[in-house]
Amino acid sequence: MVFSIPGLAAENSQAASHLKARIVEPADLLQWGVGMLVVLAMFFACVWAMRKLTALTPGPAAKMRVLGGISVGMRERIVLVEVGKKQLVVGVAPGRIETLLVLEGDDCLAQQQSRDSDGSSAFAQKLMQAMKGAGRSDA
């Protein structure tokens, strides 16, 4: 294959004539803006639809809630969790969750946690009583 310099120059001039600089007109900006609004409207419609669809099916978190908790160490906690009509006393540590006590019926702790005169919560007092009672039954 032999290339000639005049042939290459002729091809470059033809390519340059096809690639003329085009001025951006207000109609172009309007078209881009409308396109962007359409894309954003579709995005927000999808987000709205996902929220509505997930709200129709209650997840397991809707039946579970944390009623209270106390810290027993730097990274350890004892938490009272209500699941349905049961209450669970759960020990939580990094990488580990363990059920300590399951309360049902009359044994359930009150949902209103009032403060006593000494500053300790009713939850903490009842938890200690429940743990002492559970300790006696195991011995």
Image (spheres, grey):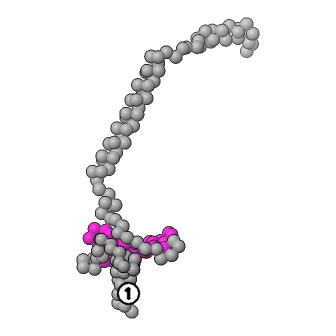
Say what secondary structure mark 1 lies in. Answer: helix
Instruction: Provide the residue designation for mark 1.
Output: 132
For this orientation, the residue located farthest to the bottom is 139
Establish if 117 lies above or below 85.
below
Residue 10 appears left or right of 97: right
For this orientation, the residue located farthest to the left is 105
Residue 126 appears left or right of 26: left
Establish if 105 lies above or below 83.
below
Q: Residue at x 59, y 12 (%)?
A: 20
Is there any visible trace of residue 127 in the rendered image? no
Residue 102 appears left or right of 10: left
Q: Quadrant of residue 109?
A: bottom left
- Label 1: how many residues lie within 10 Å, few (<14), some (14-19) or many (20+)? few
Q: Quadrant of residue 106?
A: bottom left
* Near-viewer residue (9 or 65): 65
Q: Residue at x 37, y 70 (%)?
A: 68
Please state which amino acid type lies under the numbered disc 1. Lys
In magenta segment, residue 79: yes
Q: Horizontal and vertical percent for residue 39?
A: 41, 32
In magenta segment, residue 117: no
Per the picture, the main secondary structure of the magenta-coloured stretch is: strand
For this orientation, the residue located farthest to the front is 117
Q: Quadrant of the N terminus?
A: top right
* Near-viewer residue (88 or 9): 88
Q: Horizontal and vertical percent for residue 132?
A: 38, 87
Q: Horizontal and vertical percent for residue 3?
A: 74, 12
Magenta span: 76-103
Q: Horizontal and vertical percent for residue 16?
A: 63, 11
Is there any visible trace of residue 58 in the rendered image? yes
Q: Residue at x 75, y 10 (%)?
A: 5
